[in-house]
Amino acid sequence: MRPKRGIGMTQMMYAREGIITEEMYEVAMDEGLDPELVRSEVARGRLVIPANVNHKGLHPIGIGMAARCKVNANIGSSPISSDEDIELEKLEIAIRYGADTVMDLSTGGDLNEIRRRIIERSTVPVGTVPVYQVAKEAEEILDLKPQDFIDVVELHAKDGVDFMTIHAGILLEHLPLLERRTTGIVSRGGSIIACWMSYHKRQNPYYEMFGDILEIARKYDVTLSLGDGLRPGSLADANDEAQFAELKVLGDLVLSAWEKDVQVMVEGPGHIPLDMIAMNVEMEKKICHEAPFYLLGPIVTDVAPGYDHITSAIGAAIAAYTGASFICYVTPSEHLGLPSPEDVRIGVIASRIAAHAADIARGKRGARDWDDEISRARFEFDWDKQFRLSMDPERAKEVHDRSLPGEEHKSSRFCSMCGAKFCAMRLSQRALRMRS
């Protein structure tokens, strides 16, 4: 019998006691892994299972190098647009098209109501950034008290949030390092903390009160996602002193979390040139003791507004292949506006392509089987099976039917690219028949 977790019992705590929880077992079955391997990786801190004890109806997932690369989709309102029903539509689209987790990054409207409705509806882990609510509800950010930052963390934990971005690594002494930057701080959470520290000439409350955060996380088994508040927001700022100064602090915080049996992962950049991605992943694994790495992209060129789902997918594929365990999608709206439901769909698919490509290259069990099966269906002109096996079946069928609509083309042994006479696969089959 596997134990049912209660308040104050974390996945890491059970794993270190040699116990395989229901969540560990489900992750093992989904990933095709030995449950004992999952338990040992959770105990070591190389794999996390974000599963708040208060999130009902959750299907647990594993994030770590032993598992498939996972994809997060950001949703949430803004001060300009705060329609709860639209955010719930985005949630449904994100899950339908294969997001492994969602983050509610709402900054407009009734944040408590939006968050609670998302958690109630979501079968995948839900993440938040508590400092957004701290800032949204304050008349003036500079008037906030240190305890205000902690109180919202506890509120989100009680509501059932599975993982939280906590910007505890940006310190007062890091701020002078920003003077040489092209784009300063691009993390919303990081910039809020920086303004508060600069005004009060005091240390980051999340850093100073990290022990209080650990107690909350331990109580509800919230996985901490240590925020990359000084991540580079342009290629010009990649791999600078500020980025790596914060990373060193995050490495120390990882050890503090593990001492309290709290699950933790580390967020990474950002905007990174192609040739620097592998080094960034290797640095994180070394400095942060192989805690799972959560990449925000990375975007590999700054010149493609409207197409940053592509620039990030390129970077994400390389990052995941070289050791990142979790990638955050980027939509066509990045740097331009709030994503629409269609942007969510496009962003999820682009990041899933990157994650799956990395899983194939890393030899993940069963990853190539999917590709081989659709390739056989393609050679056999089994259109229905091709559509069914596609990452986005509706889009595949829509594109095919644009030029060959109607029932008469369901069994056609060609597409409109080459037609019957020039279809290479059709000719290949003919050549093989003539040889026999």
Image (cartoon, helix red, strand yellow):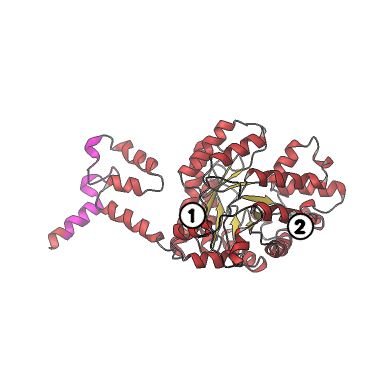
Whole-percent x, y for residue 410 in the image = 24, 40
Number of numbered discs visible in the structure rendering: 2
Is 64 situated above or below 141?
below
Tag shown at residue 354: 1
Q: Quadrant of residue 21?
A: bottom right
* Element type at mark 1: helix
As helix, strand or loop, the secondary structure at mark 2 comes to: helix
Task: Say which of 126 and 136 sits in front.
Answer: 126
203 or 161: nearer the eye? 161
Task: Give the image location of residue 202, x and y in percent.
Answer: 85, 52
- Left/right of residue 112 with respect to residue 42 in the rendered view: right
Q: Quadrant of residue 324?
A: bottom right
Tell me the residue at 82%/58% (across/down): 173
Nearest to viewer (mark 2 / mark 1): 2
Q: Position of residue 12 (x, y in %)?
A: 61, 62
409 relative position to 276: left or right: left
Q: Give the mark nearer the N terminus: 2 vs 1.
A: 2
Q: Which quarter of the rendering shows the C terminus?
A: bottom left
Residue 429 located within the stretch drawn in magenta: yes
- Using the image as rendered, state which of residue 5 and residue 404 is in the foreground: 5
Q: Which residue is mark 2?
A: 211
Residue 372 pos. (x, y %) = 33, 58
